[in-house]
Image: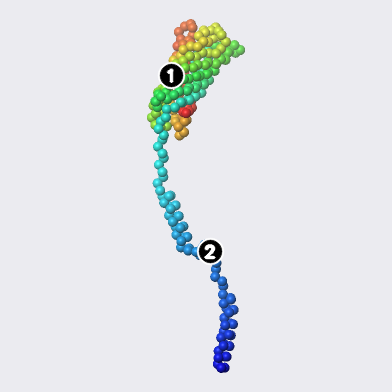
Amino acid sequence: MKAVSVGAACFAIASALALPARADEPAPAPATPETIAPSSIDLEKDRASVALAQVDAAPPLEAPPPPPYKKTLVLDSSIGAMAFLGQFGNLAPPALWLHTQLGYEIFNWLMLFGEGELAFTDTSGSQPPPRTRAFPIFGFGGGARFTARFTPRFGIYGQGNFGFMKADIRTNALGIIGFADAETLGFYAGGRVGLEWYQLDRHFALGLSAGIRHAGGFQRAIGADTPLIVDVGPSIRYAF
């Protein structure tokens, strides 16, 4: 009986000593994304890295082919100088020249157009101040342009044109010095050559052109004369 009592007492003492030790044990750490299947997360990162490397190593995409040529309206404007090679050149110095033409491309090499122009000069060549008269010259006409495109960016053209032009001045102001016909609409015919530089935007092109024409209305009434007019200037083209 004593042995049983002693054993029970020993068991109670051992249980009491063990309880504080279990209470002092640290609680298990809460679950976090870092502790849940770390191998799966690393695997996804590796797959993403491989995918990015494959994208970087892939060859660049080829540029789409240029759109097919489209017939369209074309607006061409120039600013430059107009000079007179005949006797009228002794009367009027070179003029500021503005020129605009609107055409339609029937083919990629042929365009029909209408044109208009305006120039400003004076009579300072034969009439010193204060008798010098400033006056504009205007004209209008039409023609055809033939274009050869050697590359997608560069081309040259030649055109023939005809129309009518006159000096807008007081009646007989030019007649008293021998150019009465210049005060009325007179026929002209000539041609022009030019170079065009087509921009990346298909609508735009820059150019440079020079032309020569025979303008009968600017011929001197008395004496031999060849009424030639030349013009030159840069241009900008817009294709609709």
**Residue at the front extreme of this rendering:** 1
Q: Position of residue 158 (x, y in %)?
A: 41, 22
Q: Amino acid at mark 1?
A: Gly
Q: Quadrant of residue 224?
A: top left
Which color mode does the image show?
Answer: rainbow
Q: Using the image, tell me which numbered label, if any, was put on residue 143.
A: 1
Q: Quadrant of residue 12?
A: bottom right
Q: Mark 2 or mark 1, which is nearer the start of the sequence?
A: 2
- Whether residue 128 sits left or right of residue 235 in the image: it is right
Q: Position of residue 227 (x, y in %)?
A: 46, 12
Q: Secondary structure at mark 2?
A: loop
In this orientation, which residue lies closer to the viewer: 164 or 38? Answer: 38
Label 1 Cα neighbours within 10 Å, binned few <14 / some 14-19 / many ≥20:
some
Gap in Å between the C-alphas at discs 1 and 2?
Answer: 83 Å
- Whether residue 170 sits left or right of residue 59 in the image: it is right
Locate the N terminus by quadrant. bottom right
**Residue at the bottom extreme of this rendering:** 1
Q: Using the image, tell me which numbered label, if any, was put on residue 112.
A: none
Q: Report the residue at 46% width, 61% height from top.
A: 40
Q: Amino acid at mark 2?
A: Thr
* Residue position marked by numbered label 2 in the rendering: 32
Label 2 Cα neighbours within 10 Å, binned few <14 / some 14-19 / many ≥20:
few
In this orientation, which residue lies closer to the viewer: 139 or 20? Answer: 20
Question: Is there any visible trace of residue 200 in the rendered image?
Answer: yes
Q: Is residue 45 above or below residue 58?
A: below
Q: Secondary structure at mark 1?
A: strand
